Image (cartoon, grey):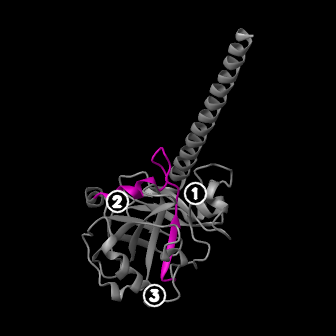
Amino acid sequence: MKRIIINLLLVFFTCVLLYSGYNLFKLGSEYWKGRSEYSKTSKEVVTENETVSEDPVTKEKVETAPIHVDFDKLLAKNSDVAGWIYCPKTVVNYPVMHAADNDYYLHRLISKEYNFAGCIFEDYRNSPGQIDPATILYGHHMNDGSMFAMLHEYTDQKYYDKHPTMWYLTPQRNYRLDLLMGYVAKEDDEVYGLFDNVQQMREYLHKVEEKSTFDPKVKYDLDKLNSIIVLSTCAYEFNNARYIVIAVPIIIH
């Protein structure tokens, strides 16, 4: 009887190990597939730019985005593309999607195939063209450091000092994102309700400014800002925590 129990336990633990190994393999495969998909897409549509160009009319030197995105090719791949988010010298180099809800691209790639990593996506309530007081971009905090995992690094001033700006390119225009503040928030933070008007957005910025985990290099008068872009990912300081980075979008040629 004792031998039977031992054999049963061996079978049980072997099954547990095999099941755990399968799940780890499956998760690893999804990470690899997600990284491969985004790497392939980037190679197809993104090219590097000179960061300074000459205005054809005034002949003056003007700032340009560090990359160019072929949106014709990208939109042919998927018409839900809203833009492209890029942060130099980081993993952030991704298409941004916009669907009819905030669930569709939570676990789908740009190909619409299921993948745990999902896409970076814009809040479904936002209007095209960044005309709202706040536009929110969401991304997973992946264990392999991909997607928006790096946002949490902005809890360290030194990390901000190395990466004070990002870029949001859209079919209509390009934006330099001057990072203004970042903080750990609850899942029901006021910003997720968006804002009815610009004044509400400005009042919100005044309230959360003191929470920021970094001090920005470029200062803005909060009472003169008409719009912000909010980058959001999961955090682990407490249950259902979020880390939010708020940026000022500056139109660039």
Q: Secondary structure at mark 3?
A: helix
Highlighted magenta segment, given as a residue range = 132-156
Residue 81 — which label? none
Query: Can residue 130 be seen from the camera position used here?
Result: yes
101 left or right of 54 in image: right
How far apart marks 2 and 1 lie (CA) works out to 21 Å
Quarter occupied by residue 193: bottom right
- Residue wearing tag 2: 154
Q: What residue type is disc 1 on?
A: Cys
The disc, 3 or 1, on the residue closer to the chain's N-terminal end is 1
User: 121 or 17: which is nearer to us?
Assistant: 17
- Residue wearing tag 1: 119
Q: Where is residue 104 drawn, in percent x and y? A: 67, 62
Q: What residue type is disc 3 on?
A: Gln
Q: Secondary structure at mark 1?
A: loop
- Residue wearing tag 3: 200
